[in-house]
Structure formats: C-alpha cells, structure tokens
Image: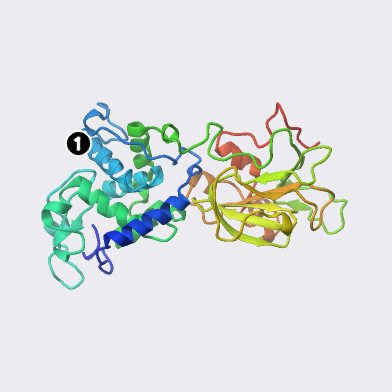
Amino acid sequence: MAEGSSKTGPILVAVPLVVIASVFALVLLFMTGAGSAAACVGGAGSVDPEKVPQEPVASYSGDQLSNAAIIMNAAVPLGLDRQAQVIGVMTAMGESSLRNIGYGDDINGVTNPDGSPTCSLGLFQQQWCMGSWGTRDQVMDPTYAATQFFTRLAAIPEWQTLKPTIAAHKVQRNADPFHYERFLDAADQVVTALAGDGTASGGCAATGEVVYPLSPGYNMTSDYGPRPVTIPGASSWHPAVDLQHWPNPCGDQIYSISDGTVTYIGGIQVTIKAPDGWSASYLHVTLSDVSVAVGDPITAGQPIALVGNEGVSGGCHLDLRINKEGTADSAIAGLTAGEDLGGPPSTHGFVNPVDFYKAFGMEICPPDSCRMPG
C-alpha cells in the first residue's frame, strides 16, 4: 500500500511539474546502458497492452500482463530506463498482484497511523483521500497511477544504485522495506517477455553491457589473486588485473568500461561508479593525463585517462579493479570478493574482473587477441 496507511511512513507532497522536468533532466544524465548483468536494463521498450503473450509469464497472465504493459509504457515518455520498468512492475505485483483493484487493506481492518480509514486503490494502492496521489478516479487510471509512481521514483537521489525493493519502498513507504524483493525476478521475466532485454531500444552495446578499457590488442600481464612479487612494495594479493599493449603501452588511451559518474580522482587512480552501484578503478595513471573531473557523468567508451607508470609499478600498464559494494545488480553482488578468498582487508568488495566480464557474457581477455599471464 502506498504511503499514509498503517504500513506507511510520512505523507509526501505533490511534486510540481517544473520540478519534475528538472528531475528528469538529471535522470537523463545518469541513464545507463550497463545495468543488470543477467539482462540488459538499458532502453525502455514500449508495449501494446492488447498484444501481450497468451501464455502465463511467471504465473501472471491476461489483464495482469496488460497492466504490466501499461506500467512499462508510462516510464517511456519520462525518459526512464528498463530498470525503472522492472521496479514499477515489481511494485505493482507486491501491491495488487497486477490487478487494478478498487479496494485496499481497509477491508482487513487496516487503518492509518492516526486511526483514520485507509483509501488505497488501484495497481499501486495509492491513497487518494490523502490528497497527494490524486483523485479516486485518477489513482484507478493505470497510466496515471504508474506515472505518479515513476515521477516519485525519479525524484529519489541515485535511485538506480539502490536495491530495487528499497527504491520501491522509498516511494510506497511500506512498513517492510523488503516487501517487494520476492517479486523482482518475476518482474524481470515479465518485462523481458513483453519488451525484450533492452538491446532493441539501444540501451546496450552489441558487445555487451560493458566495454573494454583499452583498444583491441592488449594482453593481460597480471591476474587477480595471490601472486609472486619482485617489485618492492607491491602487494602479493592482487585485487585487480593488469592490462597493457606491447611493446609501447605508455600513453595508451583508457576508456570507461561503463556509463557512470566520476567519484574519485587522486594519487594514481580514477574511480567511476556505475548506475547499478558497482565501481571501476583505473590505476597507475598520471593525474595530468586524466581528462575527466569528479562529478562528471560518463558514458561507456568515453576517454578518461592515459596508461601510466605511477606508484608501485614495474612499467606502464592499466591496473583495472572492480568493487561490487553498493551494487543493485544481483549477478554482480553474487561474485566472490578478495577478502572471502583469503585476501587482506584491503581486498574487501573487489571481485575478479575476469568473472565480472563473464557476468556480461564477455571475455576481458578475448582469446583471439589477448594473451593471459603464464
């Protein structure tokens, strides 16, 4: 049930259209072609509600799938992506089982925190009598209700980096923040069945949802994990992979492997946080060769720095490391981090980039052009 019931928290205020427009402009800066590794969450596909599959999808069928299509369509004119569509469908599953019902939890004796009757209706169980969601007829209009949901979702700072159930909770104010979690897989199945995995909408590159950090022809010179060291000060547990062209790697262009935002530049590294919450760090760069600034929105494949030899290093190369902490992507969250493999505390959250790329159906060291160490 949406905010205002005994399941909910504080009541939100209706958002003026000028504020909404500003929010959507910001959202567009952070839209991603590199979302869930299990299924691309880039472009938001439109769906004809009259042409949904005849067979059930994840136990949902008929009008339920048509309502899912209407919800998905409401995200498109707002400039939101497939990830938002999945969250919207997931939330409606948890609120109404994708049925546009004309009743709420009030039939079970549930009241608002102040004891007043609840008045939640529709796909998202929005309380029309509270004044912030619209009129009774409006919240029973699936397109209007979905638009209201997505408007508030987009207004949540960095909603893409939150767990989907938490993002939904911040809109709905359910008493249980994890209420919607069990509907996530079904929602992803429904969105995929209705509109595909996002690639047709231009949200993902043909090579996958991430791109390579160097131009083709590089080799991997050091692997992830324990390693022998001959360079004074170098770590014997490497939470990264080293990549370089040969014989002249110095000054090679480094490209961001995903869309994201620059979160750190300092010492010998640049760090970029992807919209799904994981971060990629690019080490041994010379700061004067960095071509981006903290806070910059970045697109996959954008030049960000040059290969260097700063810090504890045996020659010019790119040290690429991926930290999964904060990711909303279950495929990336499930990767094993260095600390769990016996690495020191400094390896916490850092996963093997080889496994990371495999989660996107790619080889970080393509066998037809890249040599592995050893």
Q: Amino acid at mark 1?
A: Asp
Front residue of 129/13: it is 13
Question: Is residue 176 something that shows in the picture?
Answer: no
| Left or right of 83, for residue 124 | left
**Above or below 326: residue 70:** above
| Left or right of 335, for residue 146 | left
Front residue of 196/27: it is 27
Mark 1: give few (<14), some (14-19) or many (20+) Cα within 10 Å: some
Counting from the top left corner in percent of width and height, residue 81 is at: 39, 44
Counting from the top left corner in percent of width and height, residue 106 is at: 13, 59
Counting from the top left corner in percent of width and height, residue 141 is at: 16, 47
Q: Residue at x 13, y 69 (%)?
A: 116
Give the residue furthest to the bottom: 114
Q: Total label count?
A: 1
Q: Residue at x 60, y 34 (%)?
A: 362
Front residue of 340/237: it is 237
Front residue of 183/152: it is 152
**Above or below 245: residue 124:** below
Q: Residue at x 74, y 36 (%)?
A: 218
Q: Secondary structure at mark 1?
A: helix
**Above or below 363: residue 280:** below
Kindly indicate the quadrant of the structure image that contains residue 23: bottom left
Q: Which residue, given by chain and number where applicable, does mark 1 sit on?
A: 63
